[in-house]
Amino acid sequence: MGDEHRYLTETLRGQLMRLERVLSADVHLAEDFEDTHLPAWLRRTEGEQRVPVSVAVLAAIVLQIMLPGRFALRPHLLLPALEGALLVGLAMANPVRINRESTVLRATSLSLLAVISLGNAVSAVLLVRNLVDGNGGNSAGALLGTGVAIWGTNVIAFALWYWELDRGGPAARAKGGNPYPDFLFTQMTAPELSPPNWEPAFLDYLYLSFTNATAFSPTDVMPLSRWAKMMMLFQSAVSIVAVALVISRAVNIFK
């Protein structure tokens, strides 16, 4: 009886081990199947390229440098220099793809956006104050150029904010951990019409910012979270005020 009991026990143990291996393999196959068939914006990816974001930040820095001194925070080159230093630090941490996540990098990236936004906000306030006081200048071309520079920097700044805050930022999106987007892109609602590796990148957020600043309302990208709606509302309001004041002053000068 002892040998027979031992034989039955070992046989049962072997069958249980084989069953466990089969079930484990099935689970892994199911996970792999689910991961490869999910759209890229819902699963882990390599992360987006650093170059488009860096070019946009450099463009904002150049636009701020080109502003007349009376429309910039003094000393004139202080903020652009700080922005350049922060950009270099971020590029060194994620030189090719933005997939490294840390508290320091997150704080540095948000600080860069805050500095760009602060500098442009000061320039916008100074421009509006001069226009209201009738001191915008006697050259319509120079006035329009200043308005375009501030408006363009505003578009870039809000594009960076949208890009940095949507689903926790680019590094968090690369991990695919948050299934609830703050912005609903067309490709998310019609995945069958987009390639399987599509996911929102900086140029998509730049398009969102530009259309919101020109149409003063959402176009094909819908804000879902409250903070996204409020930011788009604020951007539209700033654009309306800036465009209306600059164009009206330029028309008066032409007359």
Image (cartoon, rainbow, N blue to C red):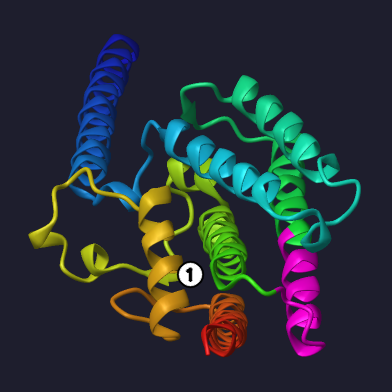
Foreground of the two, 242 or 188: 242
- Which residue occupies 78% across, 75% down? 125
Tell me, yes or no, whether the highlighted magenta stretch contains residue 122.
yes
Provide residue 54's location: percent of width, then percent of height. Answer: 53, 36
Provide residue 92's location: percent of width, then percent of height. Answer: 63, 20
In the figure, 77 relative to 25: above or below?
below
- Which residue occupies 71% across, 73% down? 137
Residue type at mark 1 is Asp
- Which residue occupies 62% across, 81% down? 238
Q: Which residue is mark 1?
A: 182
Please state the extent of the stretch shown in magenta in the rendering: 120-137
Foreground of the two, 13 or 231: 231
SS label for mark 1: loop
To which quarter of the image does residue 1 belong? top left
To which quarter of the image does residue 16 belong? top left
Tell me, yes or no, whether the highlighted magenta stretch contains residue 56.
no
In the figure, 250 relative to 50: above or below?
below
Foreground of the two, 117 or 18: 117
Q: Residue furthest left?
A: 193
Q: Residue furthest top?
A: 3
Tell me: 1 left or right of 99: left
